[in-house]
Amino acid sequence: MADEKNLVQEQEDGDLVVIMTDEEGNEFYYREEVMIPIGNKKFAILVSIEEEDTCNCGCHAEVNNDVFVARIDVDEDGEEVYVDPTDEEFDMVCEEYNKIIEEDAE
């Protein structure tokens, strides 16, 4: 993900959609599931969006295939960009996300 360009769009329902473009020009769409602040950095859990996929029941539904953890940095133009976290940051985000899930279950 580090070499990809990305664009963030806010949808009418308030969801943030991150559009990543790889070096070949292919676009991939991700929904920002949750933003997790740790210290003075922000991280996002990004879930892939596959529009018009068919689920097992035969209906058309949003199907989530991939989940990414991304650090949200600010580039030289002041725009937020999503980049790969370090291994240590990844572990911290997973720990915080698990705490959120546990709190929601209670």
Image: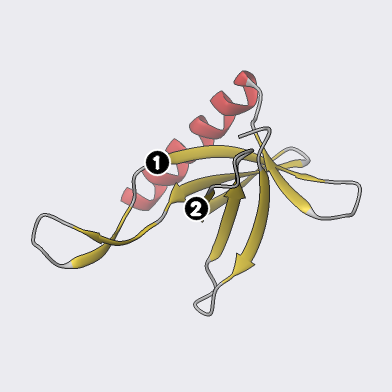
Q: Residue furthest front?
A: 24
**For mark 2, does the 10 Å Cα neighbourhood hold few (<14), some (14 to 19), or many (20 or more) residues?**
many
Residue extending furthest toward the left: 57
Can you identify the residue that label 2 sits on? 30
What residue did someone put label 1 on? 66
SS for tag 2?
Answer: strand
Residue at (67% x, 57% y) in the render: 7
Q: Relative to the observer, which residue lies in front, 35 or 7?
A: 7
For image coordinates 53% across by 37% down, the residue present is 96
Residue 53 visible (yes or no): yes
Label 1 sits on what residue type? Asp
Task: Locate the N terminus by quadrant.
Answer: top right
Q: Nearer the viewer, residue 62 or 72?
A: 62
Q: Residue furthest bottom?
A: 12
Q: Is residue 106 visible?
A: no
Quarter where residue 19 is shown: bottom right
- Give coordinates of residue 84: x percent, y percent: 64, 31
Describe residue 79's horizontal placement relative to residue 15 as left or right: right
Q: Is residue 72 left or right of residue 50?
A: right
Secondary structure, mark 1, is: loop
Q: Residue 68 at x, y = what percent?
A: 50, 38
Check disc 2 and give the amino acid type.
Answer: Tyr
Q: In the rendering, at what x and y percent does residue 47 appear?
A: 44, 49
Q: Residue furthest right?
A: 76
In the foreground, 103 or 51: 51
Q: Residue at x 15, y 67 (%)?
A: 59
Asked if the residue under mark 2 is in contact with the one under mark 1, i.e. CB atoms within 8 Å, the reply is yes
When the figure is inspected, residue 10 is found, relative to residue 83, above or below; the finding is: below
